[in-house]
Amino acid sequence: MQNVMDMKRNKPDIISFIKQAGVSSLLFIVLVGLSLTVLTVGYMSTMRNLQSSATTTHAQTQAQMQAMIGYHAFSKYLNQLSKEDNGLTLIDQLCNGEIKESNPETQIKFEPVGDCNNPVLKDQYEFDIIGKSGGASAILRVSYNMENNIKVIQQNGLIFAGGFEVNQLKDKDEKDNIVASDISIEVPNSQSVSEALKAWAQKNNITFKEYDPRNFVTPSELKDHSNYIYTIVDEKSTCNVSNFHDNLDASCSDFTFTPEDKTWTIDGAPPIGIYWFDGNVKIKMKKDKAFVATIIATGVIETKVEDDKKGTYSAYSPHTYYLDNNSRLSEICPDNYPLQYCKGKAELKADMSQMPAAISNILFLADRLSLAGIKRNSADKKEEGEINYHGTMIAKTSDDGGSNDGKRWNSNVVVNITGNFIMTEKKIDFTGNSKVVFHKGKDQANFIPINQKVFTTGGIRYM
């Protein structure tokens, strides 16, 4: 009973305590809510910053990727230009700012760095390739080195890069300046070929083609691919052997040398191989004895015969000599065989269409050719002998030894040429009384080296 009375007496205090407990809970909830709100706001702000940073980083990465893609496309573009006739001129225009961007298909953004073509380091070019993504951009600075690269093409026919002139082409064998069939002739402005020439060509299955400029190899570029290398030191002839199965077992021929005109004279048939001369070469061909070699000279290659009225004379490149008669394999690939085109003794390389094997298709490569022929009788325009050249011949110009001026064939001779005849510069004048008979070469012998400019990357870095 006493306890009940005490509880009634203290009841107001109990109620007050319960009310205070409710306010504390409410405050606690409010504080927790505020804390969560602050944390949420802070988290959202952090995430927004992280997202912004990630977006910026992603854009920058994408810009760098675009610059790298542009670099690969721009490299391809430069190498494509280098194959064109005026490609190097266009590349210079890239450097001086005349061309602002590459072809519309690639849409590469680039800028030349300074003069672009380094005046100190020859054939070195520098460009900035620009990539963009969103608001970000990236610059990739690339240094290119322009280098010579020898490749092989299949050529079939005649090339007169400077054009040619004739007096007569009417299918009268004894009078025509040129006799040919089943070949192609490349000349500039082929569409302007006269109707008389077109009629002659159609009758003989000859195709006139527009001259497609390319950089044919020069003598200096094949020096290191030769077997016998003749140079001049202190006005004396020196010779080194190279590219044999056993160089120690090879020796040079002692050709006559005249320092006054820097001329070597080859009398007869030397050992078969690839010869390189830093000057002029005079070849004295013998009756009924084949001359077999590749002769490369920085000057003039001139041929002579024992008797320009009678006899049979023949000159072959090593590969055409074998193709003419496959029993000759051991002659062009002897015990100490040349490494350019022989795999072993009496064995050619499996692929003769690649470098350096294709050099064996070349008979003569020089600055100028002066080719001997067989004299024709003035009365009946007939000849009692013949001279045959087998293999590709490349020079800036040529003559038949009469004018000795490198452009006129006017010695009243007959010359037979089987294979590619490539004149890379001057117009050839056949308006005299000589006759040149062109024969189509065998397909296997029509692979020849040409020089091609290529761009390689010297350095690359992001700016």
Image: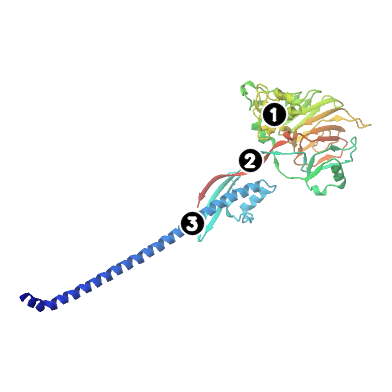
Look at the picture and state if 183 lies above or below 74. above
Res 111 → quadrant: bottom right
| Residue receiving disc 2 | 148
Earlier in the chain: of badge 3 and badge 2, it is: 3
> Would you name the residue on which mark 3 appears?
60
Identify the element where label 2 is drawn: strand
Q: Which mark is residue 227?
A: none
For residue 189, above or below residue 263: below
The correct choice, above or below, for 61 with respect to 7 in the image is above
Residue 275: numbered disc: 1
Real-space Cα separation, disc 3 to disc 2, in angstroms: 37 Å
Counting from the top left corner in percent of width and height, residue 133 is at 52, 58
Distance of label 3 from label 1 (alpha carbons): 58 Å
Q: Viewed as shown, does residue 381 lie left or right of 96?
A: right
Which amino acid does the dot numbered 2 rest on?
Answer: Asn
* Corner quadrant of residue 263: top right
Residue 9, horizontal then vertical, whole percent: 9, 78
Q: Residues within 10 Å of mark 2 (few under 14, many from 20)?
A: few
Residue 76 lies, in percent from the top left, at 61, 48
Of tags 3 and 2, the one toward the viewer is 3
Q: Are marks 3 and 2 in contact (CB under 8 Å)?
A: no
Query: Front-most of 294 and 14?
Result: 14
Whether residue 322 is visible, yes or no, is yes
Q: Amino acid at mark 3?
A: Gln
Q: Secondary structure at mark 3?
A: helix
Q: Classify the position of the N terminus by image quarter.
A: bottom left
Q: Residue at x 46, y 57 (%)?
A: 57
Measuring from the top left, give residue 11's x and y in whole percent: 13, 77
Mark toward the start of the polypeptide (1 vs 2): 2
Q: Residues within 10 Å of mark 1 (few under 14, many from 20)?
A: many
